[in-house]
């Protein structure tokens, strides 16, 4: 049983019915065709959040390149897609004209667009204010199955809902960045859209406590303190209601780790070779570290480059790691990546988003159909909404994703000795029958049936004997997963 295959088939059928219902409406037909095409496409992952939360830096860290932000005519803050392609190139999409290719130039702060590759027609608006979005292509293994969307800073959703709504229009999943996890930040989260959206919450969102190196005053243990905050907050109802998980990350440090150069390692080694009593006073503040007369062999320019790449907390951590045994660039990069929290975030993306790509894309298509039906009512409006409700209410895949999120964060209410089996049966370690049952691919069908039947009965008993509502609800989801396995084997 591959999670999402049955749901994807049902969504395709719904899209086909909708296309027939909108025969003669060219715009609706094109919209539905795009929704159908996206079902088989890469995961579309948006990086969103309040201004100055490090969105572009996190995009760079996840891709492993220095690409974001994209600047054009002195302006930034565009909706910018990063896709896999044969070569580095960019297309500008004006608000009221056809897209056109623009030349790119690498800069210390990202990419600069320096105008169209060819003369444009008079109706092209090449000014920054006229750009609707930018599409950047580059050869990248990391972009083959996931496309990233770097978004402008989100205002509170109740003051400018259009930007937040657009994120949900264009993305299958969202990394929402916050520096503090304060309620004012959480109100910027893209709101659920559609009557049935609540039934699929919060499977499409992970909250990222970014700039974690600035926690606790930027002390050397700042990253550890931020991770403790994230683990504590992920259990709280206000966050549990809007996201699958909360992860603490220093995108700046993660990006530096993935792109660490030999000359940067050499500079950090020079600092680490100094006695701590001589170096530590200069690491109390950025001003002290950059002040003239610094008693190291590093000139001011190299010190400034280290601050830009790692931040002061990163420099403190890196010099400590070098002293502790990271004697080459690869060892230091690996340790910095682990401390930054980026490796944990990558695992969360793989587990909660990439492995469930078809489910998330089906969710996007379902919400798209509902939006079309309400925006442009047709004669079969009631029928389409009824079919939509049927698909959503029967989609066990959504329940499994919510259970997996609850298991990750300790909110499932299951005893520790059964949580691991619940995760496996719900598809957390793979969605085939063999992976769900924890058996080899050579297991004969009668053994598969017997194992699935035994597990189903054991989890029915768990459901009946549950001591709490959360325990009962989680057990019932596992029972349904076992029954789905039996149905497939039968």
Image (cartoon, grey):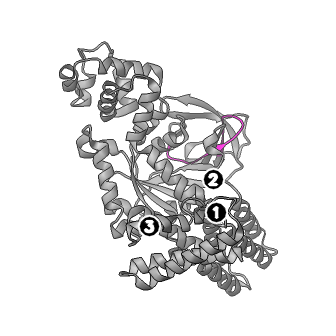
Residue 465, compared with residue 250, is above or below; it is below
Residue 289, compared with residue 416, is above or below; it is above
Query: In the rendered structure, which segment of residues is drawn in magenta?
Result: 76-92
Q: Position of residue 424 (x, y in %)?
A: 53, 64
The residue shown at (24%, 28%) is 283
- Total numbered labels: 3
* Marks 1/2: CA–CA distance: 50 Å
Residue 425 visible in image: yes
Give the secondary structure at mark 3.
helix
The residue shown at (63%, 76%) is 484
* Marks 1/3: CA–CA distance: 18 Å
* Marks 2/3: CA–CA distance: 50 Å
Disc with the residue nearer the chain's start (1 vs 3): 3
Residue 269, compared with residue 366, is above or below; it is above
Does the stretch in magenta take in 390?
A: no
Residue under label 3: 419
Residue under label 2: 95
Q: Residue furthest top?
A: 297
Between 421 and 296, the residue placed more toward the observer is 421
- Taking the image as shown, residue 88 lies to the left or right of residue 21, namely left
Give the secondary structure at mark 2.
loop
Q: Position of residue 223 (x, y in %)?
A: 32, 44
Q: What is the quadrant of the C terminus in the image? A: bottom right
Disc with the residue nearer the chain's start (2 vs 3): 2
Residue under label 1: 434
Residue 75, compared with residue 474, is above or below; it is above
Q: Position of residue 214 (x, y in %)?
A: 30, 43
Give the secondary structure at mark 1.
helix
């Amino acid at each position: 049983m591959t999670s999402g295959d049955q749901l994807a088939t049902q969504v395709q059928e719904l899209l086909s019915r909708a296309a027939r219902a909108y025969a003669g409406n060219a715009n609706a037909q094109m919209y539905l065709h795009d929704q159908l095409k996206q079902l088989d496409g890469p995961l579309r992952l948006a990086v969103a959040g309040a201004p100055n939360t490090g969105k572009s830096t996190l995009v760079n860290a996840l891709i492993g390149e220095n690409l974001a932000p994209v600047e054009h005519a002195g302006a930034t803050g565009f909706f910018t897609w990063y896709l896999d392609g044969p070569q580095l190139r960019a297309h500008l999409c004006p608000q009221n004209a056809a897209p056109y290719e623009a030349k790119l130039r690498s800069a210390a702060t990202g990419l600069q667009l320096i105008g169209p590759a060819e003369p444009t027609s008079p109706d092209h608006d090449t000014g920054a204010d006229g750009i609707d979005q930018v599409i950047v292509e580059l050869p990248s293994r990391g972009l083959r199955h996931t496309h990233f969307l770097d978004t402008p800073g989100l205002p509170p959703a109740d003051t400018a809902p259009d930007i937040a709504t657009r994120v949900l229009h264009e993305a299958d999943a969202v990394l929402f960045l916050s520096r503090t996890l304060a309620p004012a930040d959480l109100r910027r989260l893209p709101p659920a859209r559609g009557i049935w959206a609540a039934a699929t919450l919060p499977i499409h969102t992970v909250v990222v406590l970014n700039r974690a190196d600035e926690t606790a005053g930027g002390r050397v243990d700042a990253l550890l303190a931020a991770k403790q905050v994230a683990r504590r907050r992920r259990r709280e109802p206000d966050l549990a209601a809007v996201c699958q998980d909360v992860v603490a990350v220093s995108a700046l440090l993660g990006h530096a780790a993935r792109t660490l150069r030999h000359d940067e390692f050499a500079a950090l080694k020079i600092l680490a070779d100094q006695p701590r009593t001589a170096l530590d006073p200069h690491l109390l503040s950025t001003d002290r570290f950059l002040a003239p007369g610094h008693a190291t062999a590093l000139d001011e320019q190299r010190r400034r480059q280290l601050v830009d790449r790692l931040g002061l907390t990163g420099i403190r951590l890196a010099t400590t790691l070098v002293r502790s045994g990271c004697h080459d660039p690869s060892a230091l990069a690996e340790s910095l990546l682990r401390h930054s929290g980026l490796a944990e975030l990558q695992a969360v993306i793989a587990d909660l988003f990439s492995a469930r790509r078809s489910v998330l894309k089906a969710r996007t298509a379902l919400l798209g159909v509902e939006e079309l039906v309400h925006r442009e009512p047709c004669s079969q409006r009631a029928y389409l909404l009824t079919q939509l409700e049927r698909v959503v209410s029967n989609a066990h895949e959504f329940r499994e994703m919510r259970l997996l999120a609850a298991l990750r964060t300790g909110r499932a209410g299951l005893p520790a000795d059964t949580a691991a089996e619940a995760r496996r049966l719900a598809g957390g370690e793979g969605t085939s029958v063999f992976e769900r049952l924890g058996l080899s691919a050579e297991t004969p069908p009668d053994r598969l049936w017997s194992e699935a039947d035994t597990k189903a009965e054991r989890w029915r008993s768990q459901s009946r004997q549950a001591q709490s509502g959360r325990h009962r609800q989680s057990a019932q989801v596992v029972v349904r997963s076992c029954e789905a396995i039996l149905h497939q084997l039968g």
